[in-house]
């Protein structure tokens, strides 16, 4: 299982929590602003398919672990360390913004090349819905 996320170009170092779906059917979020959450019903990073890791953009009092995720650039390296000590290396390919309620079936692919998707909130705050209007997804592909 993944235990640590590192994105050197963004100075991100974070413990990884395991999360599933909420009772409402949404992917659960990290318990705090300085950790990230791996969706444990999907592939483990490095396995075929798309592993999903989410992190908070901010808190009422300031930034959170993925506050700089929008500064990721194609070619940036990402490492996910597994519980057995292996570090799986990824390279950022794209950054894409989606409406907060977009249904992205490919996000939960369980076959094909090993990919990693990092997700955080983006766009403007929607006070009525208590959420940001967009999601930023940083896509990366395994490098070895």
Image: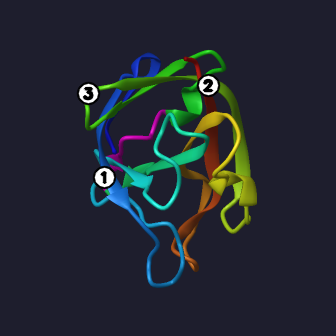
Colouring mode (rainbow / by chain / secondary structure / one colour): rainbow
Is 58 colored magenta in this rendering? Answer: no
- The residue to which callout 2 is attached is 92
- Which mark, by number, is residue 85? 3
Give the quarter of the figure containing the N terminus: top left
Q: Is the residue marked by circle 2 packed among few (<14), some (14-19), or many (20+) residues within 10 Å?
A: many
64 and 117: which one is in front?
Answer: 117
Give the main secondary structure, helix, strand or loop, of the magenta stretch: loop
Q: Is residue 71 above or below residue 15?
A: above
Which element is circle 3 on? Answer: loop
Task: Please tell me which residue is depicted at 48% across the width and 39% down the height of the picture.
Answer: 45
Quarter of the rendering containing residue 12:
top left
Task: Please tell me which residue is depicted at 53% across the width and 39% down the height of the picture.
Answer: 47
Count the numbered circles shown. Answer: 3
- The residue to which callout 1 is attached is 17
- Position in image of residue 90 (x %, y %): 54, 24
Region of the chain picked out in magenta, as a range: 61-68
Left or right: 43 as drawn, with respect to 34: right
């Amino acid at each position: 299982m993944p235990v640590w996320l590192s994105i050197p170009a963004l100075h991100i170092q974070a413990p990884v929590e395991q999360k599933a779906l909420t009772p409402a059917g949404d992917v659960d979020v990290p318990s705090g602003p300085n950790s990230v959450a791996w969706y444990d019903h999907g592939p483990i990073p490095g396995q075929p398919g798309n592993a999903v890791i989410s992190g908070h953009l901010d808190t009422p009092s300031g930034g959170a672990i993925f506050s700089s995720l929008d500064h990721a650039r194609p070619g940036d390296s990402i490492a996910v360390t597994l519980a057995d000590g292996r570090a799986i290396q990824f390279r950022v390919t794209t950054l894409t913004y989606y409406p907060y309620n977009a249904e992205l079936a490919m996000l939960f692919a369980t076959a094909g090349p090993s990919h990693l998707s990092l997700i955080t909130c983006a766009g403007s705050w929607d006070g009525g819905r208590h959420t940001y209007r967009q999601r930023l997804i940083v896509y990366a592909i395994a490098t070895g």
